Each structure stands twice: as C-alpha cells, then as structure tokens.
Image (cartoon, helix red, strand yellow):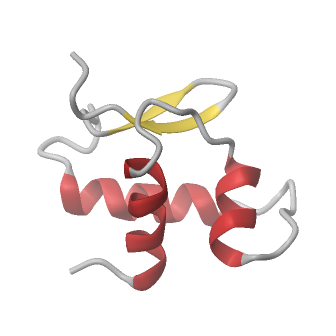
Amino acid sequence: MLTAKEFAILELLLTHPAKVFSKSQIFSHIWKEDFHTDDNTVMVHINRLRNKIETDPSAPEYIQTVWGIGYRFAGDRK
C-alpha cells in the first residue's frame, strides 16, 4: 500500500509521462514548501515507491533516474 506522499509523487509522474522532474520540483509540488538542497526526502520517497511498484527496484522500469536532472515515469519505454 502506498502512503499519501508516495501516491502523490506517482500521480505527478504519471500525469506528465516522460517529463523529467527535479528533486526540488517534486518537493515543492508535493510538500508545498521550499526545497532544501541538503534534504534527501524526495530520494527516500522515490526509493520506497520503487520498492513497492518495481519488479527489480535496482533496475527500475517505471520510475527512472535521469542523472544530474531528476526523475521521470517511463514505464512504456524500453
């Protein structure tokens, strides 16, 4: 079962397929607060979400990391 924040992150990514969101964009959208650069809240939530929805969280098919930029939903891409 997803938490409310995990669901909100998944919904954000799903409603904008293939768009890359930075950690600060995700944080601001979900938490409605300014992003703190040393805060790893988004990474922790992404990790927990991957553990719940990915077959192999170490090689995610759905929530992908775009190195140096952020995250995107790419479940239909191979």
- The quarter holding residue 30 reads bottom right
Q: Is residue 28 left or right of residue 45?
A: right
18 or 56: nearer the eye?
18
Residue 17 x, y percent position in the rendering: 40, 37
The structure residue drawn at horizontal position 31% and vertical position 53%, both measured from the top left corner, is: 50
Residue nearer the viewer, 12 or 24 = 12
Dividing the picture into quadrants, the one containing residue 48 is bottom left
Q: Indicate left or right for 52 with 6 as reference.
A: left
Residue 18 in the image: x percent, y percent? 44, 30
Q: Quadrant of residue 27?
A: bottom right
Q: Residue furthest top?
A: 78
In this view of the protein, which residue sits in the foreground, 11 or 71?
Answer: 11
Q: Residue furthest left?
A: 55
Quarter the N terminus occupies: bottom left
> Where does the C terminus fall, quadrant-wise?
top left
Horizontally, residue 25 falls left or right of residue 38, namely left
Residue in the picture at 24% in, 33% down: 61
Q: Is residue 5 left or right of residue 63?
A: right
Residue 72 image position (x, y, % from top left) = 47, 37
Depth check, front residue: 61 or 58: 61
Residue beneath the point at 52% across and 62% down: 44
Look at the picture and state if 69 lies above or below 63: above
Residue at (45% x, 49% y) in the render: 13
Q: Position of residue 59 (x, y in %)?
A: 26, 31
